[in-house]
Amino acid sequence: MDGKLFVNEVSEGYPANKQEIKPGDQVIKINAIDVRGKDRAQISQLLRGPKGTPVDLVVLEKAKNSPKS
């Protein structure tokens, strides 16, 4: 939607679930990189890394409309 990235699904027990990221939340940045206007391949590349590597997200919570990281 207009170059915005929204969380579609969160798997139980995974880091996103442990950080209380919810479906409908909007991802603003991945590792300090603004994701607006990025395509699916670019976003996948930003999210992937060696197992155990941290990924820093800035997320706009659907319910609160306030960023959290």
Image (tube, rainbow, N blue to C red):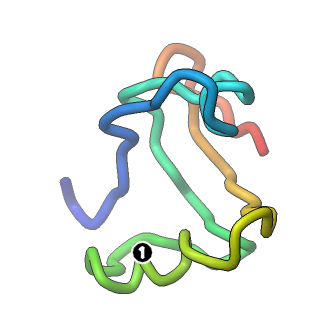
Residue type indicated by callout 1: Ile
Question: Is 68 left or right of 38, judged from the image as shown?
Answer: right
Picture coordinates of residue 4, whole percent (x, y): 33, 58
The number of numbered badges drawn on the structure is 1
Q: Nearer the viewer, residue 62 or 20?
A: 20
Query: Is 28 or 19 nearer to us in this picture?
Result: 19
Q: Is residue 37 above or below residue 23?
A: below
Q: Report whether 36 appears left or right of 12.
A: left
Residue 37 drawn at (x, y percent): 33, 77
On screen, residue 47 versus residue 7, left or right, reads: right
Residue 47 sits above or below residue 14 on the image: below
- Label 1's element? helix
Q: Residue furthest top?
A: 63
The residue at which mark 1 appears reads as: 43
Residue at position x 46%, y 43% in the image: 26
Residue at image location 59% in from the left, 17% down from the top: 64
Give x and y (percent) for residue 24.
37, 29
Residue at image coords 59%, 29%: 21
Q: Residue at x 55, y 57 (%)?
A: 28
Judging depth in this view, the residue of 69 and 9 nearest the camera is 9
Q: Please, which residue is most extreme toward the left here? A: 1
